[in-house]
Amino acid sequence: MTAGTVLVFLKYPEPGRVKTRLAVTVGDDRAAELYRDWLTQVLTTLQPLRPDIAIVGAIDGAPAEQFADWRPLVDRWWQQPAGDLGTRLDAAFREAHETGAPVVAVGTDCLELDAHLVRDAFAILTSHDAVFGPATDGGYYLVGSSRYLDGFFDGVRWSSPETLSDHTRRCENRGFSHDFLTTLPDIDTWDDWLAYCRRAGRIP
């Protein structure tokens, strides 16, 4: 049995369907190209977690065969169902928790996420029901739970400045103990990307 599961929520990098706020500045093709690179970067960053923590690609927008370029970086694929983000997260967590181990989910918008932070999240889950990695825009780059928490993803305004506050309020209302990782920025716009490149010493 693994010590835990990391669900990496991915979209297929098809122009016009990913990073639409970024595409306003750089165009659909360039936005999809950047997003493709970010998929690789995030999945590569998580490799030190293996094999004791399983990496599951929670995919959307294409069948698993079209994600073949990233197959060596995951332990298995899981196709996201229809529904809003809360519905999809709940379904993924319900299935992943069948292993009896804690589960953490991340996206691909925070390039400053690393394997150490994810291990810190699992450490928090040894003494708390839930963990969040706050993002500077009011959302979060990571969410996890020590066991399946019924209703954990209900009543959250997704992709909004209130996402994290809604979710922590949900925890408080349901009596789910929770703690936080360090706050990090997501990348949604061209300005976000430029700011990240400056911090990382990269050329945009």
Image: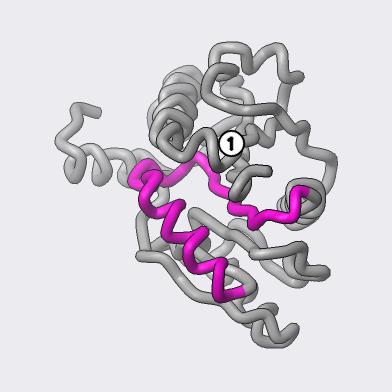
The part of the chain drawn in magenta is: 99-128
Vertical position of residue 123 compared to residue 188: above or below: below
Vertical position of residue 29 compared to residue 87: above or below: above
- Identify which residue, 14 or 8, lies in the foreground: 8
Position of residue 90 measured from the top left corner of the image (x, y, whole percent): 78, 55
Residue drawn where x is 45% and y is 64% of the image? 134
How packed mark 1 is, by other alpha carbons closer than 10 Å (few <14, some 14-19, many 20 or more), is many
Residue 31 visible from this viewpoint: no
Position of residue 5 measured from the top left corner of the image (x, y, whole percent): 62, 46
Residue that mark 1 sits on: 55
Residue 76 is drawn in which quadrant?
A: top right
Vertical position of residue 148 compared to residue 169: above or below: above
Residue drawn where x is 48% and y is 31% of the image? 43
Position of residue 83 measured from the top left corner of the image (x, y, whole percent): 82, 47
Vertical position of residue 64 compared to residue 126: above or below: above
- Identify which residue, 83 or 48, lies in the foreground: 48
Q: Amino acid at mark 1?
A: Ile
Q: For the residue labelled by badge 1, is the local secondary structure a helix, a strand or a loop? A: strand
Picture quarter with the N terminus: top right
Q: Position of 125 compared to 97: left or right? A: left
Residue drawn where x is 49% and y is 54% of the image? 141
Q: Position of 89 compared to 9: left or right? A: right
- Identify which residue, 46 or 25, lies in the foreground: 46
Q: Is residue 101 magenta?
A: yes
Q: Is residue 63 magenta?
A: no
Position of residue 61 measured from the top left corner of the image (x, y, whole percent): 71, 27
- Identify which residue, 82 or 65, lies in the foreground: 65
Looking at the image, how many numbered discs can be counted on the residues? 1
